[in-house]
Structures are given as C-alpha cells and as structure tokens.
Image (cartoon, rainbow, N blue to C red):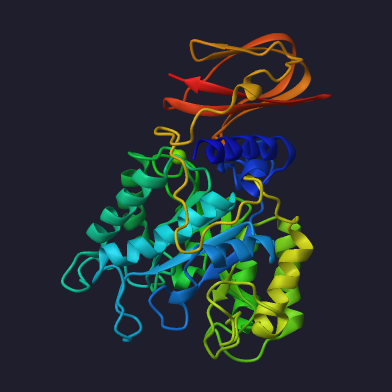
Amino acid sequence: MKITRTFFAISALASALAFAAPIDDIGALSVKGNQVVGANGQPAQLRGMSFFWNIAEEARDYWNANVVNWLAEDWHANLVRAAMAVEDNWGEGQKGYAYNQSGNQAMVEKVVDAAIAKGIYVIIDWHSHWTNDRSAKENGKDRWQLAQEFFTAMATKYGQYPNVIYEIYNEPGTDDWSQIKPYAEYIIPIIRAIDPDNLILVGTPKYSGDLTPVVSSPLSSNYSSNVAYVFHFYASEEWHLTNYLPAAKSAMNTLPLFISECGLTPASGNGTINYSMVNTFWDWLDQTKLSWAAWSIVNKDETSAALQKSASASGNWSESDLRESGKWLREKLRSVNPEWTPISGGTPTNPDNPSTPDNPSNPSTPDAPAAIAELHSATGFHFAGNTISVNLKGHSKVDLLDLQGRSVSTLWNGSANGNVALSVNAKPGLYLVRIQGAGIHETHKVAVK
Ligand code: MG
C-alpha cells in the first residue's frame, strides 16, 4: 500500500511538471468587462459537449466517468455540461430533481467529479423551462426553494474547484426578462454566500435566444460579479440566424456571453442540418472566442443526437457509433482544441468507482517522498509561515496547485527582478507551488497551515 501511494505521488508531480490539462492551462474563470477570461486575463474559450436530460432513457447511462474521459481524450472536449432535469419531462419512470433530489444530484456529482479528476470544465445546469414562475409548483414544491437547496449543495461541495460553472436556469420559457431577473437576483446571492467567485451563467428570454431585453436592463453590480449571460442557438433554424444572432452580436458589445447549448439542427433538435448556416454560426464562435457546449450526448433518434444506439456507455466509440451531429462535432472539437494531456500520469479512472478528487481542505494524498523536497531550486525557493520567498527574473508565473496538478490559484503573474514574498491564502493542506519563467520550471510541495 505504501509503495503504491508513493508511486502515485511521484507520478502526479512528474506530470505536473511535464503536462498541462485545460484547467491548468486556463485556470479560474472570471468576467472582465464583456469577456469571460482565464487566470492569465486572456479570453477563455471552452468548447465541448452537453449531456442530454439526465432522466431520459436514451441518455442516463452515459452520465459516467468513462464517457467524460472519452470526451476529453478522444473528442478533445475541455468542457462538459450536466443537464439535470427539474420537472417530470419524460414520463419514463425517472423524474427530475423535484421528485428525487438525491438521485438526480448523485448523477450530476458523478459527471462533475469525473470532470474535476480529468482537469476539464463542467457546467452544473438547472435544466428547466419554468423556474421563473414561482407560483407554479412542481410536485407541490417551490422551484426557487428547490434551486436554493441544489445550488447550496453544489457550491458547498464544489465551490473551491475552478472547473465548476453554475448555470442557474437553462432556458426560460418566457419572453419577459423582468420575470427571469428576480430569480437570478434570488439565487445568485445564495451561491455567492458560499462560493464568492466561480462563473455563474444566467438564462435569458425566449429559451435563451433573445438577449435584447437584457441589454437595457442587465443585473446590477450587486449580482453581476463573474456572471455571464446565456445565448443558445440551433444553427439550422432560420429565425435564429436572422433574429437571434444579430441580437447576440449587438448584445456582446456590453454583455459577457456564454453558449452553454447549441446545435447543428433546427430548434426542435430534429430535422435537416443546413451546413451553410452551421458554418456561419461556428465561424462566429471561432472569431469571437465565445465558449460553447453542443447538444447532445444521447442515442435518441433525432439529428441533434451525437450517438447511435450502438454507442457504449463506457465510451471508446468508433466512427460508426456516431450520428451525423456527433461526427461533425468531434471533428470540430479535435480541430480547435488541443489534445488532452494527462495530469495524473495517465492513470485511468476506474469506471465503477471514480475517485472523488482530493479536497484541498482535507487532503488524503500521503506525503510525497523525500526526493521531491530535495529538487534543486534555481529560485532559492523557501516556504515558511504560509509565505513563499522566491527570486524571480523577468516575467514569471507562480501557481498554487493541488496534489493532482489542478490549479487552485495564481499567486504571481507579472514581472519581477529579485526576491518576492507571496503569501499563500488557502485552506490548510498539502499543495504544489509551480514557478514558471524564462528558463525556470520548478515545482515544490508545501504544507499550508
Ligand atoms: Mg470558488
């Protein structure tokens, strides 16, 4: 047991030195002006796939770590979206969160845990069309209260992971922004009381198609910190091309946008794909660097479905397991996203028992072997009293990572010439400090007290 643990500690450190996963490259997301940016302040473009409604028979088996890993490794997705049903949408015996809170939440957690372990981003999506109308109860329950319970649990469990994005309301089925805004003003402070910084996505009128009403009445500064507005499009829908796209182009002059759902098909999710219109939309995404997640991972008999019935619930799909949308999206993602590289020595996740990621406040990974602490330091690295002392030259970056190489925070990103003291403000536990600069690439393990 001891030997195995030591091996993993070494392999995690070696990988942190050699490779970068998307979370390590891009880091914590924030909103600056009208843009979603990464830890380095540059526009962060996340691109990947949305899971289908978790309760649907043709979708639910894909909600697992193997599929997340396959999407990251083979499709080069750096983003997945867990679209959790709230209502009773499918009538197939499995119902949404209003009927079974723990069961639906457990499905979400399986996907989120896998994405964190893999080093990619994940959207926790409250997949509802009717949450704005508080008087209309579901299963006798108040949807706002349900959303409060769900996002309280999610922020408590995942708020410290930069991988996690909250989508508080997928597609409001109302044209009226003034009916959506109060819900956003209700739920955002609940999340912020627990998690002050992770990105929050706010759904917009007409199933997140029409941004015009939001432009004239955006959320006030009390609510808008690290908040982006949702724009959804279905590329083969004429109305989306001629009306929603121009409105989105205009809105993005002032509002940060995030495409948490988009498809190649007409808005119904089915019908003929028009590739000329598809290219118009995706060229726009490439130019604007907006993030997107495509609909969807499901083997349903409709054109927006990525998978054939033959597609295994353990991933490892061949070309013949993909439907038309799936083939196009996989090619697209592989052409625009860099190849995924391991952060934990390429150790495969056990599909039956995906490991829950280390919590920095309660690290379970044992001490790394002495050899790590003896790494030669060209920067005179010293750590005491939760303060790092280090000699930096020119432009340098110092990152705090967890023991699996995932970014926790950036401690320094700028120019320096000489000794710099950096205080580490993190929950007690073991971390890695990575120093990068001209000719410098060091990683040191520290115990924050
Ligand atoms: Mg946070």
In the image, is 357 to the left or to the right of 13? Answer: left
Residue plotted at (53% across, 79% down)? 298
Q: Residue 313, relative to residue 146: is it above or below? A: below
Which is nearer the eye, 365 or 47?
Answer: 365
Res 248 → quadrant:
bottom right
In the depicted structure, whether residue 305 falls above or below residue 445: below
- How many labels were placed on the picture? 0
Question: Does residue 375 show up?
Answer: yes
Quarter containing the C terminus: top left
Decide: is 148 above or below 132: above
Q: Residue furthest top?
A: 419
| Side (left or right) of 440 relative to 149 | right
Write down the quadrant of residue 67 in the picture.
Answer: bottom right
Residue 405 in the image: x percent, y percent? 60, 38
Instruction: Check the image and name the residue furthest to the right.
Output: 439
Q: Residue 120: image x %, image y %? A: 59, 52
Residue at x 62% of width, y 55% of height: 252
Which residue appears at 60% of the width and 91% of the height? 271
Viewer-nearest residue: 73 or 123: 73
Q: Is residue 259 visible?
A: no
The front one of 394 and 239 is 394
Residue at the extreme left of the image, as rendered: 140
Q: Quick check: which quadrant has ligand 1?
A: top left
The location of residue 313, given as percent across then percent down, is 53, 75
Residue 16, position in %: x, y? 67, 37
